[in-house]
Amino acid sequence: MSEAEIIDKLREGSEKAFRELVDQYQQLVVNTCFGLLHNTEDAEDVAQDVFIEVFRSVDKFRADAKISTWLYRIAVNRSLNFIRDNKRRKWFQSFDDLVEAKKKSLGELVSGNTENPEFDLENSQRSLLLHEAIDALPENQRVAFTLNKYEDLAYKEIAEVMKLSVSSVESLIHRAKKNLQKKLYYCYKKKCI
């Protein structure tokens, strides 16, 4: 089914069209949510909300953009709303989850389940630092950077999703890179991992 056919069938209330939409775009939506939330369960929950919103608001879709652009926009907005609504929760992991993850990593290292335990531990620490640095970026920078680096969207597509000009997106991504460079430079210079 083409995008226009899917939208027409959704407007008629077709469950088959909805299933096809979900099958076709579910991974895209979950990945987008995960890029902002850094938690698989939360990303899957928010993705379900995205598809529910799509089903309920399909009549508002003007078809001046691709379905994927519309879904990105909804996924980004829902993810940001989720973050705002759950400010007291840590965006990446709660402290208890972090402690458990470290125990698990150390347990795997001790049991010898990895080929290069020191390298694996260092990579997980780097990943944690990077996610924390990305989460600390201003919201627009974080969204633009995530869509570009995690979702591999072109600047033009990001501009459509964020309803900004391409030059604004370029500027946001440039500033995000500079801010990340500043945040991560000190740690790598001091060899904190």
Image: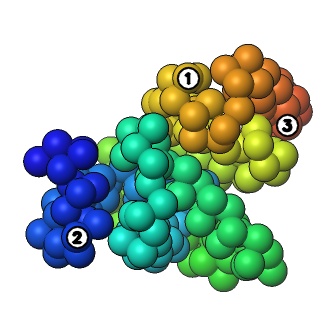
Name the quadrant of the C terminus: top right
Which residue position is annotated with label 2? 12
Task: Where is residue 39? Give x, y as percent.
Answer: 53, 66
Amino acid type shown at disc 2: Glu
Q: How far apart, in angstroms, are the residues tagged by discs 3 and 1?
A: 27 Å
Task: Where is residue 91? Give x, y as percent.
Answer: 69, 66
Horizontal side, residue 13 vs residue 110: left or right: left
Q: Residue 164, located in which quarter of the rendered image?
A: top right
Closer to the camera in the image, 190 or 178: 178
Horizontal side, residue 112 vs residue 152: left or right: left
Above or below — where is 138 with respect to 153? below
Q: Dot 2: what SS?
A: loop
User: Mark 2 vs mark 3: which is more N-terminal?
Assistant: 2
Residue at the spot 36% in from the left edge and 71% down from the top edge: 55
User: Mark 2 vs mark 1: which is more N-terminal?
Assistant: 2
Above or below — where is 141 with respect to 26? above
Closer to the camera in the image, 100 or 163: 163
Label 3 CA crowd tier, 10 Å (few <14, some 14–19, many 20+): some
Residue at the spot 18% in from the left edge and 50% down from the top edge: 5
Residue at the spot 41% in from the left edge and 59% down from the top edge: 30
Amino acid type shown at disc 3: Lys
Closer to the camera in the image, 25 or 149: 25
Which residue position is annotated with label 3? 183
Q: Dot 1: what SS?
A: helix
Which of discs 2 and 1 lies nearer the camera? The answer is 2
